[in-house]
Image (cartoon, helix red, strand yellow):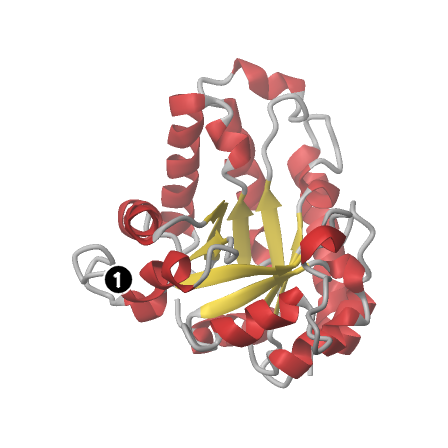
């Protein structure tokens, strides 16, 4: 999906909501556990209920890999279901990959070739040669003839966990913080057409600092909802003319109800967030 297609989708739906599919079999409704594939059954119901109110889905690979082959099959089925039934949805594999060049090439082949997702989260702290394979090493065969321009790398920039203070917020002798250095340097590797950044919603006014370094980039923003991030602050400091935001909510939507009404309640919660977003759009 291109940048313009994503923007058009946001404007058409009046929403920049991304629903996180952090599917934990210990939290899904008990009646689903008897299904042949409980993870996919849950995902399918959530997707069917929330698709009118969001523009993206973000399966977190950890919740699938924890179940071995069965979990990966559920992930693959989820991606295929989205592509076949909701082709306008932007699919983000939240896998946080990042390794030396030849390993990154294999990760790129996996997610952009085999699974053909739109975007992949990548850890940038091993530097250029761990990131650029995701951007420029795809062949037409890997990307099914569409070219690498339709795939996105989403770099971890500024996260909301307490450990972010250990490295991301440290300053060099010139006062530049590490997350700013990562964003600034990474713009030499990719562009606003194929690179986004993860910025935690709980950082609030820090979005002003992000926008000084990346004025036009799309930001994937987790932390709204169960983690307490403020959608109002994210929009106030992070939104640009082309929107430039994908705000993710996972637990607050998908686990809002634990009964057989879970999908209906998830739809209501997604609609609430989407309605707030509609009033914030430029």
Q: In the rendered view of the protein, which quadrant contains the C terminus? A: bottom right
Seen from the viewer's position, the closer of residues 267 and 3 is 3
Q: Would residue 176 be found to the left or right of residue 116 on screen?
A: right
In the displayed structure, 281 sits above or below 85; it is below
Q: Residue at x 67, y 45 (%)?
A: 250
Q: Residue at x 50, y 61 (%)?
A: 154
| SS under mark 1 | loop
The image shows residue 266 at horizontal and vertical percentages of 69, 43
Q: Would residue 17 be found to the left or right of residue 48 on screen?
A: right
Q: Residue at x 64, y 26 (%)?
A: 28
Is the residue marked by circle 1 packed among few (<14), some (14-19), or many (20+) residues within 10 Å? some
Query: Picture quarter containing residue 241?
Result: bottom right
In the displayed structure, 175 sits above or below 92; it is below
Residue farthest left in this picture:
141
In the displayed structure, 139 sits above or below 50; it is below
Q: Would you name the residue on which mark 1 appears?
A: 137
The image shows residue 171 at horizontal and vertical percentages of 72, 68
Q: In the rendered view of the protein, which quadrant contains the N terminus? A: bottom left
Asked if residue 218 can be seen in this view, the reply is: no
In the displayed structure, 53 sits above or below 280; it is above
Asked if residue 109 can be seen in this view, the reply is: yes
């Amino acid at each position: 999906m291109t940048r313009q297609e994503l923007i058009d989708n946001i404007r058409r739906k009046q929403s920049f909501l991304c629903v996180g599919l952090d599917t934990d079999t210990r939290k899904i409704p008990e009646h689903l556990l008897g299904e042949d594939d409980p993870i996919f059954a849950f995902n399918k119901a959530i997707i069917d209920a929330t698709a009118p109110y969001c523009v993206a889905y973000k399966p977190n690979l950890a919740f699938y890999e924890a179940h071995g082959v069965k979990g990966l099959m559920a992930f693959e089925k989820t991606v295929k279901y989205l592509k076949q039934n909701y082709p306008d949805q932007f699919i983000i594999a939240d896998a946080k990959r990042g390794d030396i060049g030849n390993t990154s090439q294999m990760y790129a082949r996996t997610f952009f070739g085999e699974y053909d997702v739109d975007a992949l989260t990548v850890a940038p702290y091993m530097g250029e040669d761990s990131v650029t394979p995701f951007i420029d090493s795809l062949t037409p065969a890997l990307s099914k003839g569409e070219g690498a321009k339709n795939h996105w790398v989403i770099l971890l920039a500024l996260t909301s966990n307490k450990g972010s203070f250990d490295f991301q917020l440290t300053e060099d002798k010139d006062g530049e913080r590490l997350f700013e250095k990562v964003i600034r340097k990474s713009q030499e590797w990719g562009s606003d057409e194929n690179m986004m950044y993860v910025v935690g919603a709980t950082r609030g006014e820090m979005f002003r600092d992000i926008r000084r370094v990346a004025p036009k980039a799309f930001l994937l923003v987790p932390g709204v909802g169960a983690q307490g991030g403020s959608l109002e602050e994210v929009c106030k400091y992070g939104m640009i003319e082309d929107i430039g935001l994908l705000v993710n909510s996972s637990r607050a939507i998908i686990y809002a109800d634990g009964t057989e009404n879970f999908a209906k309640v998830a739809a209501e919660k997604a609609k609430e967030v989407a309605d707030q977003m509609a009033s914030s759009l430029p």
